[in-house]
Image (tube, rainbow, N blue to C red):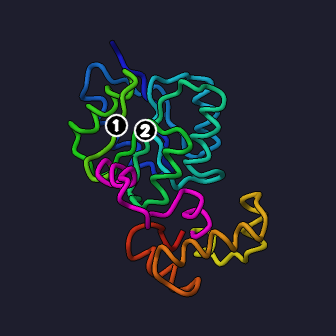
Amino acid sequence: MTVRVLIVDDHPVVRDGIRAMLGTQGDLEVVGEAVSGADAVRLARDLRPDVTLMDLQLPEIDGATAISRIREHDPDAKVIVLTTYDTDGDISRAIDAGAIGYMLKDTGREQLFDAIRAAARGGSALSPAIATRVLSWARADAPDALSGREVEVLGAVAQGMSNKAIAAHLCISQATVKTHLLHIFAKLGVDDRTAAVTVAASRGIIRLGG
């Protein structure tokens, strides 16, 4: 069985490298390349690849949003995130959007090949470091773990957004934003927004700088 793969990355050198790697495998065929999130959505609909390799940082719309739109059109679409970002916020947002796998770009060739094949069969494909992180979220003994929504709120705070702007962005009330912030402060053991962002970044919960 030949697995048809769509590559989504805005860096030509990265795309060339992935295409060359996959070209060494007789059962993996690159059927298209996208350089933006919007391109990814369009090509996924037109080409119907077996597996899409999706970066997160993309022009126009980001990778997580592109995954969500692809899955809205085709609930069976299989997308593996292939990125350099490994914060809790990036991982949870991609998985919530419908990604079937999450691999880092320093993943070994054979691991990546195996992940693509596993995804094509409908299995999950997580790099070991990401799998460990995801499993830790599921532990019942982690009451201080931030929820997905709390990570979203804190990520917006890190971007300098006000409570009003966060409420509009997430389609929730300002009172709800304040409640989320109180929970975040308690879980992180801090007293203000700046400290929350600093601690969360140091723990790899959110990513600073874009």
First in residue order: circle 2 vs circle 1: 2
Q: Secondary structure at mark 2?
A: strand
The boundaries of the magenta stretch are 131-154
How far apart marks 2 and 1 lie (CA) works out to 7 Å
Crowding at label 2, few (<14), some or many (≥20) Cα neighbours within 10 Å?
many
Q: Is residue 150 magenta-colored?
A: yes
The nearer-to-camera label among 2 and 1 is: 1
Query: Is the residue under label 1 in contact with that under label 2 (CB below 8 Å)?
Result: yes
Which of the image's four quarters has the C terminus? bottom right
* Secondary structure, magenta segment, majority class: helix
Side (left or right) of 133 relative to 7: left
Question: In the orientation shown, which residue stands out farthest toward the top?
Answer: 1
Q: Amino acid at mark 2?
A: Ile
Asked if residue 3 is positioned above or below residue 147 in the image, the reply reads above
Residue 107 position, x and y percent, is: 26, 48
Q: Quadrant of the N terminus?
A: top left
Q: Tell me if residue 78 comes above or below residue 143 in the rendering.
A: above
Residue highlighted by disc 2: 80
**Residue placed most toward the observer, 16 or 160:** 160
Instruction: Report whether residue 13 is seen.
Output: no
Residue 52 at x, y = what percent?
47, 33
Q: What is the x, y in percent for residue 167?
A: 75, 66
Q: Which residue is denoted by mark 1 in the rendering? A: 125
